[in-house]
Amino acid sequence: QDAMRRDALVDKFLSRLTVEQIGLSTGLAVTFGSREAGKAQRIANAIADAYVEDQLNAKFEATQKATKWLSDRIAILANQAQLADSAVQEYKAANNLSNSTDGTSVVDQQMTSLNAQLIAARADLAQKQAMYAHVAGLQRSGRAADVSQVVESPLISQLRGQETDLIRQEAQLKSRYGPNHPKMLDLESQKANLKQKIDEEVGHVVQTVANDAAVSAAQVRSLAGSFAQLESTSLVQRKAGIKLKALESRATSARSMYEAFLSRLIRRDR
């Protein structure tokens, strides 16, 4: 009976209540029929206020739900972006992938520098090998005295000076003594000894030129070996760079998604 009485009262109340749209607007006109005008106005106003409050509560609840959903989504996206960035850095470290400030590969820069050194070293080697071939040829033909390094040697110049002095002495004594005279034999012995020293020193000069060429050749081999290693490393890195680009693209996409949702949340808060 209470339920029936309540339903009857509600039906009676609703029968006196009229809600109409005002023209084409979204506004509503609320009227309530009663013998007392003041009472009718109070009830109509109360109904309007209750409706407005209900709409505000519904909108606020919807906003809260949307904000919570955005916040939860942003937290997930932030974690995904962080994981994607970490994956990029870990892959770079694992594959020794690093770029200089201008964006070029460190290995490629090293290759460029090493290639310049290798070109210079090969040019130097060619020059020293040509010099050694020239010096060795003059030595074999008995013209070692024509070698510029021999001419510039202080020791050889000193020995040649001594040799010239002995020749002068020999010329002076030749008119007084025969070839078998002890003084003449002593001069010949000194000349032979000087010639041997000069030949030995010339040999040292030639050996020095040979050593310079050998050192230059060793340097070329070392640089060539290092360059080959860098080429191998560069090839591996180029292959690894393909996967790195995919990881970086994924990280960029994750960050963009995160920033878009974060911007949307900030706009809602404003």
Image (spheres, rainbow, N blue to C red):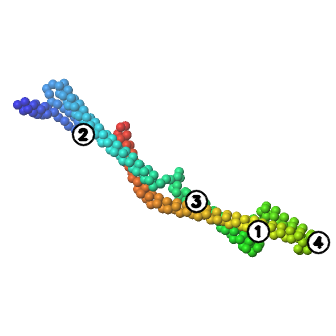
3D distance between C-alphas at marks 3 and 2 = 85 Å
x, y percent for residue 99: 50, 53
Task: State the residue at coordinates (36%, 45%).
Answer: 79
Which residue is disc 2 drawn over? 23
The quadrant where residue 183 appears: bottom right
Tell me the residue that label 4 is attached to: 176
**Labelled pair 4, 3 in contact (Cβ < 8 Å):** no
Residue behind mark 3? 114
**The disc labelled 4 sits on which kind of residue?**
Arg
Mark 3 nearby-residue class (10 Å; few <14, some 14–19, many ≥20): some
Please name the amino acid that badge 2 sits on.
Gly
Evaluate if marks 1 and 4 touch, with contact meaning CB atoms under 8 Å apart: no
Disc 2 crowd rating (10 Å Cα; few below 14, some 14-19, many 20+) is: few
Outermost residue on the right side: it is 176
Q: In 3D space, how far apart are the residues under numbered discs 1 and 2 (Cα atoms)?
A: 125 Å
Q: Which residue is mark 1?
A: 199
Compare residues 181 and 213 and report the one nearer the observer: 181
Q: Residues within 10 Å of mark 1 (few under 14, many from 20)?
A: some
Give the Cα separation between the discs numbered 2 and 4: 153 Å
Toward which corner of the image does residue 151 lie, by quadrant? bottom right
**Horizontal placement of 209 versus 184: left or right?**
left
Q: Amino acid at mark 3?
A: Leu
Question: Which of the two discs, 3 and 2, labels the residue nearer the N terminus?
Answer: 2
Are dots 2 and 4 in contact, CB under 8 Å? no
Q: Can you tell which of label 1 and label 2 is closer to the viewer?
A: 1
Residue contact between numbered discs 1 and 3, judged by CB atoms under 8 Å: no
Looking at the image, the residue that sits furthest to the left is 1
Q: Residue at x 35, y 39 (%)?
A: 268
